[in-house]
Structure formats: C-alpha cells, structure tokens
Image (tube, rainbow, N blue to C red):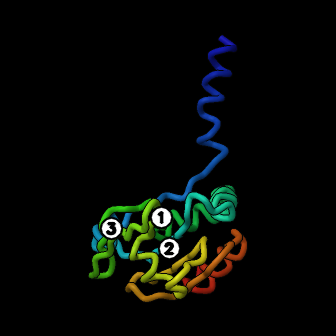
Amino acid sequence: MKIIIRFLFLMCMPFFCFSQIKTVTFADLEILQKENSKPIIIHIYTSWCPVCKIESFELNKDKDLVKLINENFYFVNFDAEKTKEKIRFQGEEFNYVSNGSSGIHELVLALSKNKKQPVYPLWIIIDKNGNLVDYHEGLFRAEKMKKKLGELFDF
C-alpha cells in the first residue's frame, strides 16, 4: 500500500510544484481575440539560444508571474527558426524564409527592430487593440517582467 501511495504522490507532484505559462498559437490567437480580447505577449526564441532556455525555466518558476500571464494575457511562444508554417497576424501573412540548412520566419523580421540579425530572446507586448506597448531584446527576468506588466496594464 505504501508503494502505491508513493507512486501516486510522485505522479501528482509536478502538478503541485511546477506551473506553466499557457501558450497559444497565432492561429488560435485570431479566434481567441474575437471571443475575449486580451493583451498579447510574444516570446521569440531559438532552440540554440542558451539565454532563452534559462529564461524560460526561470519565468515558469515564478508562480505569481505565471498566474498573472495566464489570467490576463495570451502568450505566444515562437521559435524564430523552426516555425515553418504560414502565419496570419494583424491582417498580414508571413512565411518561413529558407537559407540553405537554416532559415528564419518573416514574422520575426517584421517584429524585430534589427531586421538583419534579430536579438534573442525577443519580447513583444501588444495591447488588446493590437498596438505595440513594449519591445524588449534579451533576458527578461521575472521580477522585471512583473513590474513592466504592472506599469503597462495597471496590475
């Protein structure tokens, strides 16, 4: 009986210890915005970026930030170099541009201020009306993000 209880405890432990930021796709975003308009956070990263990996882990560790984002925003996690499908965003279509063995999505170039070489991670925060309200290149620590979101949206 003790073995069964330990097994069940270990299986359920991740649900109690780790929280996750709920993500949506750009395709879902268009539908969700029509149903319930919310501000949008777009996190642009690459799989090879060590800062992106550390940042993602750190942000998901902060339960208050996860709750704030999940309740008040739509969060899009967007891999700049691996996302290859056509994306429709704010009335425009964007495609993946191949460059031999790698490539980049046109949407990343459209959102980035540095059109030749975007900086990762890149954070784009858009209000519920579709207006850019914040642009952040590089590491975005949880405390700084909570403060910024509070300033922008009175949380």
Q: Amino acid at mark 3?
A: Leu
The quadrant the N terminus occupies is top right
Q: Which residue is mark 3?
A: 32
Q: Earlier in the sequence, mark 3 or mark 2?
A: 3
| Residue extending farthest top | 1
Q: What SS does tag 2 mark?
A: strand
Q: Mark 3, mark 2: which one is toward the viewer?
A: 2
Return the x and y of residue 124 as percentages of the image width and height: 52, 79
Q: Name the residue located 69 percent from the left edge and 59 percent from the top edge.
A: 54
Is 16 situated left or right of 25 in this image? Answer: right
Q: Please say if 152 is above or below 54.
A: below
Circle 2: is it few (<14), some (14-19), or many (20+) Cα within 10 Å? many
Percent x, y of residue 41: 50, 73
Reading the chain from its start, which is encountered first: label 1 or label 2?
A: 2
Residue 127 is labelled as: none
- Looking at the picture, how far across and down is residue 116, in whole percent? 52, 83
Alpha carbon distance from label 3 to label 1: 25 Å
Type of amino acid at the residue the image marks with label 2: Ile
Residue 81's tag is: 1
Q: Which mark is residue 41?
A: 2
